[in-house]
Image: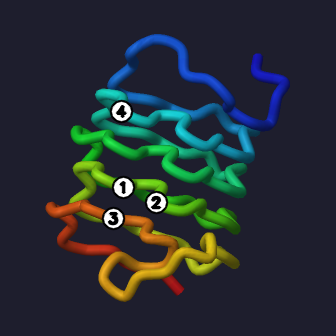
Amino acid sequence: MQSNKNISEQNGDEKNIVVPEGIQYIGAHQYENKDIESIVLPSSLKGIGCFAFRDCKKLVEITIPSGVLLIGPRAFENSGIREAKLPSTIKGFDVYRSKTMGPSGLFTNCTDLKKADYCR
C-alpha cells in the first residue's frame, strides 16, 4: 500500500496505468516520455506537476477528475492527446500563458488535439 500521497517515481514500462486512490499529486516529469496508452486518475488527485505527461505520444485522451486544483506548466506538451476533459475545480495553472495553447501552455505542440472541454 502506498503511504506517500505523492507519486515521485515511475517503475516499469506500464502502458495502462491506474493511479491508486489516495494519491494527491503527480510529480513533475512523472510519466514523461513513457509509452502510456491510458491512465485512470483517482478522485483524490489535487494536482499535476509540470511536464508530467510530456512526450507521451500514445496517450490520446485524458479526463482530469473533479477536485484537481492545479496543473503545472506544459503538463501534456508534445503528447498524443486528442481529447481532454478539465474540471471546473481547477483554481490555477502556472503563470505561463498562451492564447493558442491554453493556460500554462498545457497542450503545447499537441498537434492532434481536437477537443478540450472545461467542464463547469
Label 3, on which residue? 108
Please tell me whether residue 47 is drawn above or below residue 26 in the rendered image.
below
- State the residue at coordinates (24%, 61%): 110
Label 1, on which residue? 77
Q: Amino acid at mark 2?
A: Arg
- State the residue at coordinates (62%, 76%): 95
Distance from Cα at disc 2 to Cα at disc 4: 13 Å
Q: How many marks?
A: 4
Q: Amino acid at mark 1?
A: Glu
Within-10-Å neighbours for mark 1: few <14, some 14–19, many 20+: many
Camera-nearest residue between 99 and 81: 99
Distance from Cα at disc 3 to Cα at disc 4: 15 Å
Label 4, on which residue? 33
Mark 2, secondary structure of its residue? loop
Please tell me whether residue 71 is drawn above or below residue 92 in the rendered image.
above
Whether the residues at callouts 3 and 2 have beta carbons within 8 Å, the answer is: yes
Label 2, on which residue? 74
Mark 1, secondary structure of its residue? loop
The residue at the far right in this view is 3
Whether the residues at callouts 1 and 3 have beta carbons within 8 Å, the answer is: yes
Instruction: Give the mark, 1 or 3, whose residue is nearer the N terminus.
Output: 1
Distance from Cα at disc 1 to Cα at disc 2: 5 Å
